[in-house]
Structures are given as C-alpha cells and as structure tokens.
C-alpha cells in the first residue's frame, strides 16, 4: 500500500492528511440497534467523528458538525458520529436529543485504535472520500468550514 502525507492549512488550523490506496469499511450499531456500514455511504464524503459525552472539545464541535451534516446530507457529504465510551444507551439517547443531533450516532468501544486507524485523543475525525479511501485525519476539533475547504482543495489537486 502506497501512502503519502500532506499538510493543508484550512480555516487557520493544520489538518494532517493521510491518503490510503485501499478502501476501508466498518460496521457499528446505531442508537436503534441497526447495524450501519461505512460502505453504505459510498459516493459521498464521510466525516467519521470519534467523540464522547464527557469531552469538552467534542461538545464544542458537535453543533457545527450538525450544521455541516444538514447542509450536505442530501448532496455530497455526511457526518457519522462514533461515541467511544461505555455509557448506557438511554443516557446516550437523551444526550443526543438534548444536543439536537440528527446525524447518525454509532456506538463504538473505547479503544486506542479503530478500523480507520489510531484515536490518540478525543475528538478525532477521519475524512473518507466518496470512493471509500481515508484522505484525512484530524486529532482535535474540526469545523464544517475546515472540511469544506479540505474537500475543495482535494478536488482541485486531484484534477491536476
């Protein structure tokens, strides 16, 4: 597998990028117990955001991720939130309702590594291309504007 590392300045924040040559997939249950597959979203950009309810930076970025998801879900991109903590399902559902989150929330297990790669801190986000390739990872908060700028720059560089 051939890997390149890029660094992109997006919205004033450094976003490190790892471009993988093979597609990735995973399956996790959502809050209703339905199994969701990353591959269900092929054809769209997917921001996989690993977070927890006790994480202040995670709570800070959730409203902006909700805005990004709603602006793009019917066109070209979605957000998948993966909760990485042991929390009762009913408590997580209440939290999601109180935060007015409509993007899919999946239940993961706390772990330093996921099928997409390492999660050294929360929040950590991975951006998956419409073809299913990991194209970026951000440790720390991410904004919808950062993601939009990255996608636009990625498309420009791919067109060259």
Image (cartoon, rainbow, N blue to C red):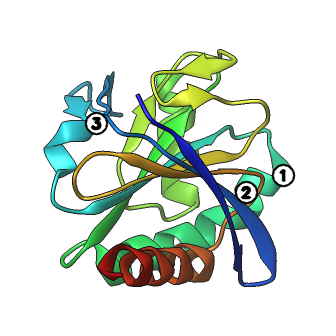
The quarter of the rendered structure image containing the C terminus is bottom left
What mark, if any, has residue 56 been given in the picture? 1
* Residue situated in front as seen by the camera: 8 or 51: 8
Q: How many C-alpha atoms fall within 10 Å of the one at disc 2: few (<14), some, or many (≥20)? A: some
Of marks 1 and 3, the one in the foreground: 3
Q: CA distance from mark 1 to mark 3?
A: 32 Å
Q: CA distance from mark 2 to mark 3?
A: 30 Å
User: Which numbered disc, 1 or 3, marks the residue that appears first in the sequence?
Assistant: 3
Q: Tell me where residue 101 appears, x and y as whole percent.
A: 46, 61
Q: How many C-alpha atoms fall within 10 Å of the one at disc 3: few (<14), some, or many (≥20)? A: some
| Callout 2 secondary element | helix
Q: Quadrant of residue 46?
A: bottom left
* Residue situated in front as seen by the camera: 140 or 151: 151
* Residue situated in front as seen by the camera: 7 or 89: 7
| Callout 3 secondary element | loop
Q: Is there any visible trace of residue 86 in the rendered image?
A: no
- Residue drawn at (32%, 25%), measured in percent from left and top? 26
User: Which numbered disc, 2 or 3, marks the residue that appears first in the sequence?
Assistant: 3
Label 3 belongs to which residue?
23
The quarter of the rendered structure image containing the N terminus is top left
Label 2 belongs to which residue?
59
Find out whether the residues at labels 1 and 2 contact each other: C-beta distance under 8 Å. Answer: yes
What mark, if any, has residue 123 been given in the picture? none
Q: Tell me where residue 36 appears, x and y as whole percent.
A: 23, 33
- Residue drawn at (31%, 68%), measured in percent from left and top? 77
| Callout 1 secondary element | helix
Q: Tell me where residue 25 appears, x and y as whole percent.
A: 29, 30
Report the side of 32 relative to 5 (left or right): left
- Residue drawn at (62%, 62%), measured in percent from left and top? 62
On screen, 147 above or below 71? above
Find out whether the residues at labels 1 and 3 contact each other: C-beta distance under 8 Å. Answer: no
């Amino acid at each position: 597998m051939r890997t390149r590392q890029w660094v992109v300045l997006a919205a004033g924040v450094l976003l490190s990028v790892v471009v993988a040559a093979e597609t990735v997939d995973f399956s996790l249950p959502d809050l209703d117990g339905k199994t969701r597959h990353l591959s269900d979203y092929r054809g769209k950009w997917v921001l996989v955001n690993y977070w927890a309810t006790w994480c202040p930076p995670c709570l800070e970025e959730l409203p902006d991720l909700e805005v990004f998801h709603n602006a793009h879900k019917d066109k070209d991109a979605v957000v998948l939130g993966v909760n990485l903590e042991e929390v009762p399902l009913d408590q997580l559902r209440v939290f999601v309702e109180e935060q007015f989150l409509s993007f899919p929330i999946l239940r993961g297990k706390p772990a330093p590594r996921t099928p997409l790669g390492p999660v050294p801190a929360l929040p950590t986000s991975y951006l998956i291309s419409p073809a299913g390739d990991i194209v970026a990872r951000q440790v720390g908060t991410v904004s919808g504007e950062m993601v939009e700028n990255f996608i636009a720059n990625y498309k420009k560089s791919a067109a060259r």
